Image (cartoon, helix red, strand yellow):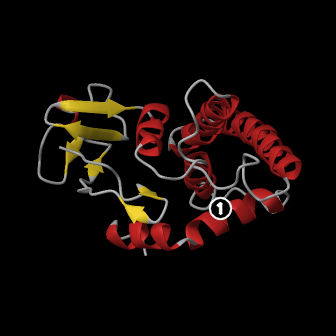
């Protein structure tokens, strides 16, 4: 069963985790399990927090990981505006995800691809404006949060999709800064991505 992803670095400690790779095309785990038995939607992330108790969806997984953190940025007081701003930022990441993700489909008609690229530009303009507003290189005034880690992953998809994001220097810098973090480098190595 999948366990907390290696991105679970919070504060100055690492949450114990076990990585389980998933082939999303055939919906199987690296050890041959049917991933839809773990997450019926067949999507990642899936986080087993105890035997048979699995969380899915980025907003739930990232909030759960944040609540295990000693960092106030990752774990703002529930019912505070900071808590809801964090959820809002994670939700915004999903808006960006929903515009970039479909571009991985190999059978998209050119006209659909062009329209999606227009939507990607609109969303990346919004990311850029938000980063300009905070002025600290992150999505929220409190600094680095799990929303930034998620946004960096999503923005990084522009590379294999060959989407030029040079018009969005703050967004590019966010991605680069997140991936330069020690925990991100460790995660990328563990996943065999570098």
* Image: 186 above or below 93: below
Query: How packed is label 1: few (under 14 Cα within 10 Å), some, or many (20 or more)?
Result: many
Q: Quadrant of residue 83?
A: top right
* 76 with respect to 29 (left or right): right
Give how far across and how far down residue 29 sits, in percent.
20, 47
**Viewport quadrant of the N terminus:** top left
* Image: 32 above or below 162: above
Give how far across and how far down residue 9 sits, in percent.
43, 60
The residue that disc 1 covers is 175
Q: Residue at x 62, y 51 (%)?
A: 148
Q: Quadrant of residue 191?
A: bottom left
79 or 144: which is nearer to us? 79
* 157 with respect to 168 (left or right): left
Look at the numbered disc 1 and give the secondary structure of its residue. Answer: helix
**Viewport quadrant of the C terminus:** bottom left
83 or 94: which is nearer to us? 83
Give how far across and how far down residue 85 sits, in percent.
68, 33
């Amino acid at each position: 069963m999948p366990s907390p992803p290696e991105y679970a670095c919070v504060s100055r400690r690492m949450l114990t985790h076990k990585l389980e790779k998933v082939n999303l095309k055939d919906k199987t785990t690296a050890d041959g399990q049917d991933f839809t038995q773990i997450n019926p939607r067949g999507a990642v992330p899936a986080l087993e927090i105890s035997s048979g108790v699995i969380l899915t969806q980025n907003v739930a997984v990232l909030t759960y990981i944040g609540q295990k953190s000693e960092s106030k940025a990752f774990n703002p007081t529930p019912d505070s505006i900071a808590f809801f701003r964090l959820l809002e930022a994670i939700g915004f990441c999903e808006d960006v995800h929903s515009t970039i993700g479909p571009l991985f489909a190999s059978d998209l008609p050119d006209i659909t691809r062009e329209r999606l690229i227009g939507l990607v530009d609109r969303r990346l303009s919004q990311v850029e404006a938000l980063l300009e507003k905070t002025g600290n290189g992150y999505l929220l005034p409190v600094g680095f949060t799990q929303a930034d880690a998620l946004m960096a992953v999503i923005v990084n998809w522009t590379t294999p999709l060959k989407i030029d994001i040079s018009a969005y220097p703050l967004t590019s810098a966010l991605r680069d800064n997140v991936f330069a973090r020690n925990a991100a480098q460790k995660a990328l190595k563990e996943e065999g991505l570098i």
